[in-house]
Image (spheres, rainbow, N blue to C red):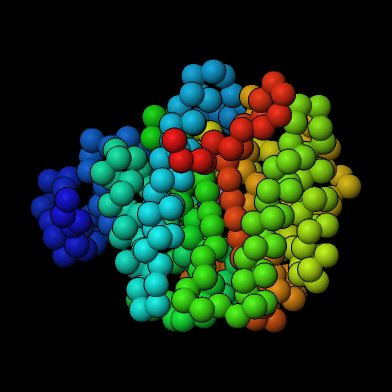
Amino acid sequence: MRVLGRNDPCWCGSGRKLKHCHVTMGVGRSVPPAIARPPYARGLAADRPEAMVKDASTIARMRRTGALAAEILTTIADSVRPGITTDHLDELGHVLAVEAAAYPSPLGYGPKDNLFPKSICTSVNEEICHGIPGARQLRDGDIVSIDVTVYREGVHGDTCVSVPVGDVNDDGRRLIETTREALDAAIATVAPGEPLRRAGQAIEAVATREGFGVVRDFVGHGVGAEFHTDPRVPHYDEPRFSTVCTPGMTFTIEPMIAERGWRAELLDDGWTAVTIDGSRVAQFEHTLLVTEDGVDILTRRA
Ligand code: MF3
Ligand code: CO
Ligand code: CO
């Protein structure tokens, strides 16, 4: 499949170059018109706030979309090597989504005056999350977080991993493995009737044990027909967080763990969050479903 460039005529038939076309918002790669877009990518506001507990049809669709997100993420993660650009990872994510008749959820998401311009997020070293893919070449020793969200059958699936580029030093590898362990520990707390606060407690315990810090500025989130909805899921112990897990709830848990300081600031691109002290960060994310007797990971390969 050929991916259109920004100087190609837009697929919408306006005769404009892609980069000037309002239909594709000039934000990046194109998505064929036959692929259903989420409301924000059609210039629409979300309908009504989405219920936290999903019906059986939504859950069935989320299983399929979640499996696709996992599949795409694995393929991208396997292609990471020194010298590859983050834009190349983005192209791969975009093409794999479109070939599977899915819309890459980040593309055109966000505030009207600063839509996210790419199809995945790539965050390197001290970048915490929402890094914008570009010409940057990954170097031996880097840690790259790859966050894939796709939209198909009217629902999103959202998942992220951190990957070592070539040889990463001991502390960096420990950071990655600790963050993976923290997500697993958080998932293990999820069950009907359990306070969702336990997830943040579990993450904080694992991170603290290793002398690492948990980023507080970004939280897990409800997900379904909407990309980001209730509940907000803190990755640290938040006493005021009183949501209790109920069967049918779908949300992400996506801890970001910093080597030292977790305090964050935003770059002037309006998206990329970085640690103020330059600490490296790792992140893992799954989309989860509370079942009758526990939890299912929806972003798992079929
Ligand atoms: N996938 C991210 C999350 O886990 C959100 C990315 S939004 C974007 O919530 F616009 F930055 F892509
Ligand atoms: Co998410
Ligand atoms: Co994500």
**Quadrant position of residue 212:** bottom right
- Measured from the top left, where is residue 292 in percent x and y? 69, 21
Give above or below for 169 relative to 26: below
Query: Which one is in front, 195 or 27?
Result: 195
Q: Is residue 44 visible?
A: no
What residue is at 74 percent from the left and 48 percent from the top? 185
| Left or right of 190 in this view: 173 | left
| Left or right of 41 in this view: 260 | right
How many discs mark residues in the rendered view?
Answer: 0
Q: Is residue 19 visible?
A: yes
- Measured from the top left, where is residue 105 in percent x and y? 42, 47
Give above or below for 218 relative to 43: below
Give above or below for 29 relative to 124: above
| Left or right of 296 in this view: 94 | left
| Left or right of 161 in this view: 264 | right
What residue is at 80 percent from the left and 50 percent from the top? 202
Identity of the residue furthest to the top in this view: 56
**Quadrant position of residue 153:** top left
Identity of the residue furthest to the right in this view: 239
What residue is at 62 percent from the left and 43 percent from the top? 252
**Quadrant position of residue 181:** bottom right
- Measured from the top left, where is residue 6 in percent x and y? 21, 63
Query: Which one is in front, 53 or 188?
Result: 188
Query: Which one is in front, 183 or 195?
Result: 183
What residue is at 49 percent from the left and 31 percent from the top? 62
- Quarter of the figure with the C terminus: top left
- Measured from the top left, where is residue 230 in percent x and y? 66, 38
